[in-house]
Amino acid sequence: MLKNKPQATRRWLDLAPGDPVIVVTGKDKGKQGEVLRTIPDKHKIVVKGVNILKRHTKAGARRGGTTVAQGGVVDFEAPLDYSNVMLVCPACGKPTRTKHTVLESGARALVCRHCDEPYERVRKTEAQ
Ligand SMILES: [Zn+2]
């Protein structure tokens, strides 16, 4: 009998900062941007120019241990779910789901499902 399902292991996020992505769902659907940050633990990413929220801050308010000198409204990019975006293939320019492959060199790579071009990038660290 199945007592407990195996815990979902932390999924490797295919996207890394600097990758071109397109938003496929939500209020910013269709917007393209560049990945600024990834938050693998929360399965979220931050994309430049996407999911802009406004943070209202009062002058003198304390936020994160620092005192905000100037009050006002600050635009910032809120994290959105990883599944809301797709990688844009640089080779064929289409938003694509990727499959994984291992190159002859042993490096991991993503492959575009449309054109089978490996999407290569310099990945600094495996674990972020
Ligand atoms: Zn492609």
Image (cartoon, rainbow, N blue to C red):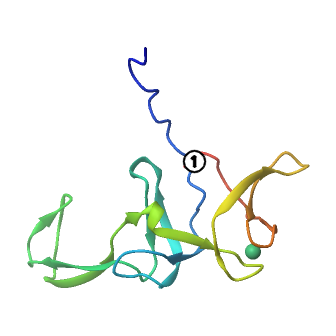
Of the residues shown, which amino acid type is indicated by label 1?
Answer: Trp
Which residue is at the front of the view, 113 or 93?
A: 113
Q: Which residue is mark 1?
A: 12
Q: With respect to residue 96, does 109 lie above or below?
A: above
Which residue is at the front of the view, 126 or 9?
A: 9
Which residue is at the front of the view, 38 or 64?
A: 38
**Which residue is the extreme one toward the front?**
1
Ligand 1: which quarter? bottom right
Answer yes or no: is residue 19 visible. Answer: no
Q: Position of residue 45 (x, y in %)?
A: 45, 63
Q: Position of residue 109 (x, y in %)?
A: 76, 56
| Side of 80 relative to 12 (left or right) | left
Q: Tell me which residue sits at (47%, 27%) in the image.
A: 6
Q: With respect to residue 81, does 125 lie above or below?
A: above
| Side of 18 relative to 49 (left or right) | right
Q: Quadrant of the N terminus?
A: top left
Which residue is at the front of the view, 63 or 36?
A: 36
Q: Tell me which residue sits at (75%, 72%) in the image.
A: 114
Q: Tell me which residue sits at (46%, 36%) in the image.
A: 8
Q: For residue 89, which quarter of the picture?
A: bottom right
Q: Is mark 1 within 8 Å of ligand 1?
A: no
Answer yes or no: is residue 106 visible. Answer: yes
